[in-house]
Image (cartoon, rainbow, N blue to C red):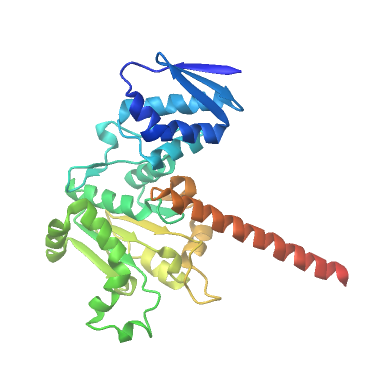
Amino acid sequence: MEYKINIPEEIDVQGLFGNYDANIRSVEKFTGTEMNLRDSVLSIRGRDPELAARIVARLIEALHNDPELDPQKLNYLIETEAGGKSFTEPVTPKDIICYTHTGRPLRPKTQAQKEYVDNIRNTDMVFGIGPAGTGKTYLACAMAISAYKNREIERIILTRPAVEAGERLGFLPGDMQEKVDPYLRPLYDALYDVLGMDAAAKLREKGVIEVVPLAYMRGRTLDNAFIILDEAQNTTREQMKMFLTRMGFNSKVVVTGDITQIDLPSGTMSGLKEARKVLTGVEGIRFNYFSEVDVVRHELVKRIIKAYESYDNNNKVRTSTSKGNKVSSR
């Protein structure tokens, strides 16, 4: 079977095909097809030409909205179309979260990110759970900055647990704030990227933005604030309960974490894993889940996550089989 697609005149063929035809070659490899362009008509033959045609149509649609088709966006469009989860990146002004200090608009890049942002807009407490690189913390920081600029809240609180805070921190130079700063660096990075270093520093000096270790949250009640807990998988159940009950009037809480990267001592229950069991279904709380498809870092990061998931799943199967054999041998 052969499929043919007419390439619209307004579409830059070079942008569609990519450098050295890299974009089309990726689609061909994924679908087992071959494509040839002649007189603005793309002919597709091979194992799954229908899927290839749908993917190309999605690429053309994406190019109508944004002339740049980077590798991450290309792979995301291929995988979502193949999985029957087509997603059009938002392009209307209302979909823009905010602008970075360089003027770059920030908007969701995947379906999971869009649902996450929508939930933050419409819900007082949101959990974002998934692997590194899916934009959980970055988007939360952008939403917090947007809320402050729109005068919806008066201050932004960013916090995360310092898992090693006991023996290792004591050997670092400086006061307690300087000791925990290395653990808070990812939060600073997100702020600097959106606001710029100077603007972020000024807001910190004024007390509008606080970046603090989780231990500093005890005993506080936070009204008119946007509060983000990062790396929540490394909280204990007591720390998580303490944090969630800091929420005051006219405040939003966003909790982010990756339950596959828990650094707590063996046998310690992760506060994030328990919160997911306890709070799912509670009115006013939303849980958003991300996967490797939503990774917006280097494509290799996505492959690493898949490799570890496959390795862990195989180990579980082997362990289960081994236990079953021991029981049957008795």
Decide if residue 277 is on the left or right side of residue 120: right
Q: Residue furthest top?
A: 39
Snapshot quadrant of residue 90 = top left
Which is more toward the observer, 320 or 14?
14
Q: Is residue 84 visible?
A: no
Residue drawn where x is 81% and y is 66% of the image: 325
**Relative to 108, residue 42 above or below:** above
Residue drawn where x is 44% and y is 24% of the image: 57
Which quadrant is the N terminus positioned in?
Answer: top right
Residue 30, horizontal then vertical, whole percent: 54, 36
**Relative to 176, residue 10 above or below:** above
**Relative to 65, residue 262 above or below:** below
Q: Is residue 125 visible?
A: yes
Residue 168, horizontal then vertical, whole percent: 37, 83
Q: Residue furthest right?
A: 330
Residue 65, horizontal then vertical, whole percent: 31, 28
Q: Residue furthest front?
A: 20
Residue drawn where x is 34% and y is 27% of the image: 14
Which quadrant is the C terminus positioned in?
Answer: bottom right
Decide if residue 4 is on the left or right side of residue 203: right
Residue 112, horizontal then vertical, whole percent: 43, 43
Which is more toward the observer, 47 or 88?
47
